[in-house]
Amino acid sequence: MTMTTTRGARRCGWLLALVMTALPLAGCVTAPPAPVVQAQVMPFEQAAQAAVDGMLRQGDEGAGLFGAKPKVLVLDPTIDGLTGQQTAATQALDRVVAQRVRERGSEALRFDAQGVGKATHLVVGTMTRADKAYQLNLALVDLGSRLVVAQSSARASATGVDMTPLAMFRDSPVLPRDRGFDGYVKTASTAPKQPADAAYLDRLAGSAQAQEPMALYAAGRFREALAAYRAAAVGGSDQIRVLTGVYLSSVKAGTPAEAEEAFGQLVALGLSTNSVSVKFLFAPGSTDFWPDPKVTAAYAMWMRQIAAQLARSSLCVRVQGHTSATGTEAFNEALSTRRAANIRGRLVALSPALEPRLRVLGLGSKENIVGTGTDDVVDAADRRVDFRVVGCGAA
């Protein structure tokens, strides 16, 4: 009896080792799989403090952040992990970081050329919507070794969280998502002792220079902002933010020719990386543009530049329409298809040679990147049109 039992146990163990499966085997008793533990969802302020404190605690334990010779921190402003925008809520998270660092006897320097030059460590953070909560990710990077030395996360309830974009991001015609954005998001969730994204760090000085004129733009000092963005462009700074800044500041400063040139460069930059997302605002349930000319006055110029940039290339492009999350899936898909067809028709009217190179696809709300369904400035990115480069033989 003992021999039989032993052989049976050995046989079951051999089978389990061979197939590595959770399916029950006759005569074998296996432990149930460990349950997946979902991080607790907390009010925003509590979640922000938990994420910040976790990062600082790891940084102090692993890198002597607040030791006898405290490290010098600089904070690259937190962004929405889906849109790349800075918002009221990401600013609030930044304030918690600065406050907690000060309470520990150190300081988080401003993200500008001087701050980046002095800093030994860099803080990056993202807020990413998932269902009815926001995932907060914070990472601390040693700028000498370029390694992440601390990473902490928390989940915040979406209730009461204000994701209204800051002025420049609200006014921007395109989403600020490029290779630098991808690297920033990746770095914010990178585990300790792993390298931060190299492409993101290589752009750090330029990104800091591009950040400085934003305050001038927000303060309504548009001519000064334009001059600062021009200087950043000469210095080879973060291209998408600098070109967006030149475009917006030129519009506000009354230099339309410069604005149109900058917008054309934005489109060309997006096409060079295979995709550009433009925030056309349509009237609810319609293929007509929003009726307020203050909102849509630039659309004719946008169309002209998109058509011109496409005409200069041999690219084939899929015009993809999107809607916010309100309405049924079938209605949203049909509406987004009609909107994309509207944009395609306008482009072909401007440049008939584009007709065989432009396809149409309506995605409804399937690729929402905000997902609130508020139909206001917060989810404007969900009501966008993407120009996605595709193979010319693609359906």
Image (cartoon, rainbow, N blue to C red):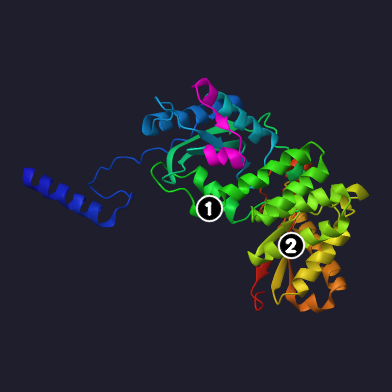
Q: CA distance from mark 2 to mark 1?
A: 22 Å
Of tags 2 and 1, the one toward the viewer is: 1
- Residue 374 in view (yes/no): no
Identify the magenta region.
101-118
Above or below 40: residue 176: below
Give left or right: position of 214 versus 69. Answer: right
Sequence-wise first label, 2 or 1: 1
Residue at 29% from the left image edge and 53% from the top image edge? 20
Label number found at residue 265: 2
Q: How many marks?
A: 2
Q: Residues within 10 Å of mark 1 (few under 14, many from 20)?
A: few
- The kind of residue on which mark 1 rests is Asp
Above or below 179: residue 380: above
Residue at 82% from the left image edge and 38% from the top image edge? 220
Residue at 79% from the left image edge and 76% from the top image edge? 354
* Helix, strand or loop for disc 2: helix
Asked if residue 112 lies in the magenta stretch, the reply is: yes
Residue 68 position, x and y percent, is 39, 24
Label number found at residue 202: 1
